[in-house]
Amino acid sequence: MLWLITFGCLVAYAAGLILLTRIMPRLIKRAVDEALFIGVAAVAILGAMLAFSAVGVTFAIFSGGIGVRILDALLLLLLGIVTLRTSLKAFRTPRYDSSQNTNRLSQIITGSFFLLLAVACVAVLALLFVPA
């Protein structure tokens, strides 16, 4: 039964990563004061919650065993790499492509959100191996 929950957590983790990477281009094209920006941002927050919940649930179910700590560290490293890469992509301004109609304030807000997710990954990774 525990492995079924772990598999469900890994599926939620993958869904969260997919949501995070697919939502960023939609966020930077919207103005901050549009209602659709808020809806798309809510989906990005849901993706982050799904990805981080997989780490928390597996850690709690298996009582922080060394194997689970290693699995969670790998999940956090992958999440940190994806969010940092997405953050850098959001901060980058399109140079020669005029078809990308981006809003600068949306780029800053989106890039900051993903950068804070990367910082949160590093913080949770540091707390993962601190003895209780």
Image: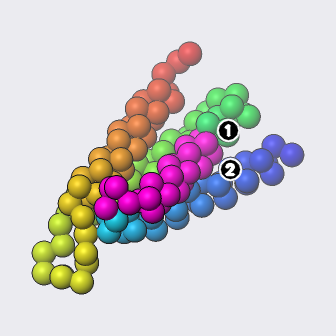
Residue 82 shows in the view = no
Taking the spot 61% from the left edge, 42% from the top edge, the residue there is 53
Q: Nearer the viewer, residue 65 or 83?
A: 83
What's the mark number on residue 13?
none
Q: Nearer the viewer, residue 112 or 106?
A: 106
Element at label 2: helix
What's the mark number on residue 9?
2
Mark closer to the chain start, 1 or 2: 2
Q: Quadrant of residue 7?
A: bottom right
Q: Residues within 10 Å of mark 2 (few under 14, many from 20)?
A: many
46 in the magenta segment? yes
Element at label 1: helix
Q: x%, y% of residue 102? A: 25, 69
Q: Is residue 24 above or below residue 12?
A: below
Residue 56 shows in the view = yes
Q: Nearer the viewer, residue 66 or 99?
A: 99
Q: x%, y% of residue 39? A: 50, 58
50 in the magenta segment? yes
Taking the spot 69% from the left edge, 31% from the top edge, the residue there is 60
- Whether pointer 1 and pointer 2 mark residues with C-beta atoms closer than 8 Å, the reply is yes
Looking at the image, what colour scheme do you see? rainbow
Residue on which the image places disc 1? 57
Task: Specify the amino acid type for callout 2.
Answer: Cys
Taking the spot 51% from the left edge, 52% from the top edge, the residue there is 42
Q: Quadrant of residue 32?
A: bottom left
User: Alpha carbon of mark 1 to alpha carbon of mark 2: how far?
Assistant: 7 Å
Left or right: 112 as drawn, with respect to 130: left
Tell me where the magenta segment starts and ends, as one range.
Answer: 31-55
Left or right: 95 as drawn, with respect to 63: left
Taking the spot 20% from the left edge, 60% from the top edge, the residue there is 104
Task: Specify the amino acid type for callout 1.
Answer: Val
Q: Residues within 10 Å of mark 1 (few under 14, many from 20)?
A: some
